Image (tube, helix red, strand yellow):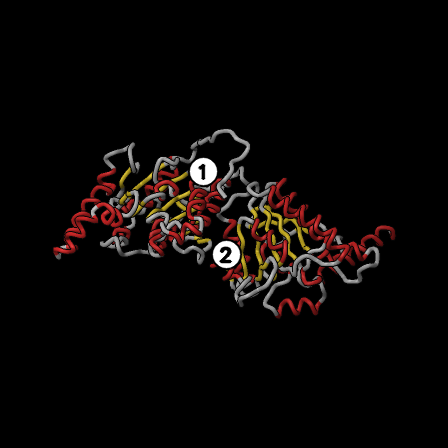
Amino acid sequence: MGQWMDGFLAKLEKVQTENEAGGGPDRIEVQHSLGKLTARERIQLLADPGTFEEIGSLVRDFHQMDGSSQKASPVDGVVMGLARISDRPVMVYSMDFTVMSGSLGEQGAWKIAELVQMAGQEQVPIIGILDSAGQRISFKDGMVGLNGLGRLLRNYSLYSGVIPQITLLLGPCTGPLAEVAVLSDFLIMNRKTGFMWLGGDIRSEQAGRAEFHMTKAGQVDLIAESDEEAIDLTRRLLEFIPQNCWEEAPVCDPTDDPGRREEDLLDIMPDDSRFTYDMHEVIEMIVDDGKFFELKEDFATHFIIGFARFDGKPVGIAASNPDELSGIMEPDASDKYDRFIMFLDNFNIPLLTLVDTTAFPPGDKWERKGVIRHGAKNLHGYSHLTMQKVTVVLRRSYGGSNIVMGCSKMGPDLIYGWPTVEFAPTGPEIIVHAVFHKELAKAKEAGNYDEVYNFYLGILKEMFSVMTMGRIFTHWYTVHEVIDPRDTRPRIIKALHATADKNEELPEKKRYIKPA
């Protein structure tokens, strides 16, 4: 080898050494003292061993070239490249907090924007790890950086629905960069070190923290206790989703009997409909090996979303939870439901809907919160679903839930109902008071109020029972079949097999316009 090449290789080795050092040993020590891994450690833990191939390693803050900045900026604070996770190709970037507090510079913004576009063109998931004080601020860099940031946000938006987008928020994330986290399909946040805030005053101690964005804002899908757990959750999440919108989600060899009947389902339902039960118990009994990967667990807890498998096939589950607020469909639940089913449909993942709800709540409080327009989003969204759709109604499906939860002629492939199901325009109790108020008033005077009330309630419950409604197949409310609760799992699996090759088409259009 000649001296000519030796000189270039020496320069390359110098750059690689600088990259490994990041912001230097002192900054790395601080990073570790905060309970955080470095950018490169995070990628090494996320990717299969030896599969990460870095790109953009020569990039630096261009102000160093003109002498206006003396700060070291290896890779301009963004480590990125190609990798494999469980032998699946992905593209990943990780912001380096040891380099100028992870602030996003002009070159860093363009690097990420380019990587997102590459991931979209190569049709592989993009995984971003955020740990940044926000956009780098200076007259020169700030003005130019907005251009790169604009392209970054545009590329995230353009390739939304083309490839899965997952973001891990493992440190601070402020200003416009926070939009990247929320534009992603899934956001995983470190409870101890994650912080996200757009701007303005912070008026409470919890604002910006993981719990705030989960329970109040509904912007976080999963909360981790450490960087390591966040990375593990990412790997688990990828098990349920495909590489892109044209492929199917990965199917694994089943380890649970597809014909398994669950005797304990007979004891789930309370004898008195005024009492509740937890839908999580039903889910765990019917899915493969009892494993349910729940999302947004602490937001709108009366509505459940998440992933599971049936006979090895990934399925998205959307379920009302009667154990919380009777499983009502209020605005937060509607938003939670809407975003999830849009993801499932776009990435060809079947939807299982489990229904026991008193539907949309009436009253001034909910009207002020926009219950109508939020419900309209569910109506509009479900109407456009073309993936496999199976509905199981367990007990109550009142009012608008019959439409938005796939209990009527809105396009579900199969609707099953337990024999305990009641379909009604609203709760029978409300109808009794509205229709028979005069009779109830007389009964109250006569001292036999409970007897008269229960008499009329019993008549209505009999009318609204699926055992009565089921005799009318194409009118009012209906199911395709009333089933023994113990057969819920095998019925769902058979329905998924039967509809695997379905072809449902929508009217041709440029795009649909969802209610605000």
Q: Which x, y percent locates residue 185?
A: 54, 48
Marking on residue 385: 1
Amino acid type of the residue tagged 2 in the rendering: Ala
Residue found at x 63% / y 54%: 177
- Most extreme residue toward the right is 3
Q: Is 271 on the left or on the right of 188, as rendered?
A: left
Number of numbered discs visible in the structure rendering: 2
Q: Is 403 on the left or on the right of 106, as rendered?
A: left
Q: Which x, y percent locates residue 64?
A: 80, 57
Q: Nearer the viewer, residue 420 or 237?
A: 420
Q: Which x, y percent locates residue 303?
A: 40, 52
Amino acid type of the residue tagged 1 in the rendering: Leu
Report the residue marked by disc 2.
217
Label 2, residues with CA under 10 Å away: few <14, some 14-19, many ≥20: few
Label 1, residues with CA under 10 Å away: few <14, some 14-19, many ≥20: many
Q: Earlier in the sequence, mark 1 or mark 2?
A: 2
Q: For numbered disc 2, what is the local secondary structure?
A: loop
Residue found at x 44% / y 32%: 504
